[in-house]
Image (cartoon, rainbow, N blue to C red):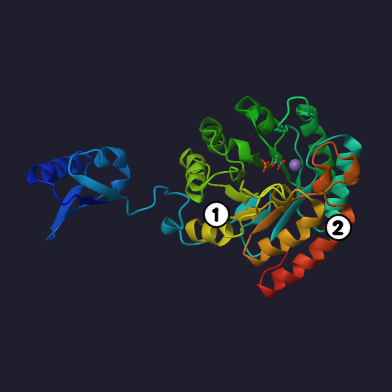
Amino acid sequence: MIIVMSPGATEQHIDGVVKKIKEYGCEANISRGVERTIIGAIGDERAIDQELIDALPGVEQSMHVVKPYKIVAREWHKENTIVDIKGVPLGGNTVQVIAGPCSVETQQQMDDSAKYVKEAGCRLMRGGAFKPRTSPYSFQGKGVEGLEMFRKAADAKGLPIVTELMDVRMLDTFMEWDVDVIQIGTRNMQNFDLLKEVGRVKKPVILKRGMSATISEWLMAAEYIAAAGNHNIIFCERGIRTFETYYRNVLDVTAIPVLKKETHLPVIVDPSHAGGKAWMVPALSRAAVAAGADGLLIEMHPTPCEAWCDADQALTPGELKTLMAELGGIAKILGRDI
Ligand code: PEP
Ligand code: MN
């Protein structure tokens, strides 16, 4: 940590900072300039509470020099991490497309969806059994019955399943149904108790970006999961809130290279909840793969106009197939496959 003292700081102020640094188990390196004194805290500076340093008399400002996140940072782990999802690698050379309906509706709908996901060449399937809806009067998901339908449909096609966990009380049920990837939705990105609990299991976790979360808040949220013991984390950019109202959210493509620089963990993109319209999904998917995303999370419904949730943004099975072929071409240029 670097602490810049104000021009009027006295020797007593400097001594006060040095004493505080030592309390945290660090050594102080004092550099006296003509106008100011700068103090360097040497050692494990993560333990130092910046707010307490800033509050000391004579301190102008302080800054940490190492990242506040540790396990998820590329600084500490140079190689890309590949998350293994029942034998399907995510984060390696292959771009993985996770497709399926917004929500689980009926057994027939899930059986048909699984068939189309497989036929399009995707290796993982999505579907929500517990839905976070803006209105309490909207369809809330089929719940445990939905997990059962999903498991049955996906197992018939050998597809690992991705589904959202909203309530920590359902975690044991998710384990019983052997959910392959636990999705933490945008509204729960900073539900720290939920993050700690999914950190205690070994299941891969897709951590969606909070709709107004900064990159640093997102990385710290992932650190919660990692610090509890689960390092199988996948970041998912799903669009952020801005002043624009034309589309549902703004897909932050910039977040892809930034996250790839900051973390060794896989980064995927959900173009469906970003654009909010099916016709935008192909363009946003192409942009995401071109920018280096390790995968996509795409909503597809056997008959989108009959979907119980997010009908407007679901691709048809045919559109998913066409998109997969296009993405294959982009991946190839980048030396990847799909
Ligand atoms: C979803 O993927 O079903 C979903 C609700 O997404 P988000 O949390 O990004 O809104
Ligand atoms: Mn949806």
Vertical side of 169 occupied by 69: above or below: below
Does residue 242 appear to the left or right of 130 in the view shown?
left
Q: Answer few, some or many: residues within 10 Å of disc 1's Cα (few below 14, many 20 plus, some between 14 and 19).
A: many
The secondary element bearing badge 1 is classed as loop
The disc label shown at residue 20, or none: none
> Whole-percent x and y of residue 172?
64, 28
318 above or below 180? below
What residue does disc 2 label? 319
Residue at x 68%, y 63% (from the top left corner): 287
- The amino acid pointed to by label 2 is Glu
Neighbours of disc 2 within 10 Å: few (<14), some (14-19), many (20+): some
**Viewer-side residue, 145 vs 237:** 237
In 3D space, how far apart are the residues under numbered discs 1 and 2 (Cα atoms)?
Answer: 29 Å
Mark 2: which secondary structure? Answer: helix
Sooner in the amino-acid sequence: mark 1 or mark 2: 1
Q: Residue lying at the far bottom in this picture: please name it.
A: 333
Which quarter of the image is occupied by the C terminus? bottom right
Give the x, y percent position of residue 203.
Answer: 61, 41
Question: Looking at the picture, does residue 73 appear above or below residue 147?
Answer: below
Asked whether, in this view, residue 198 is left or right of residue 142, the answer is left
Residue receiving disc 1: 265
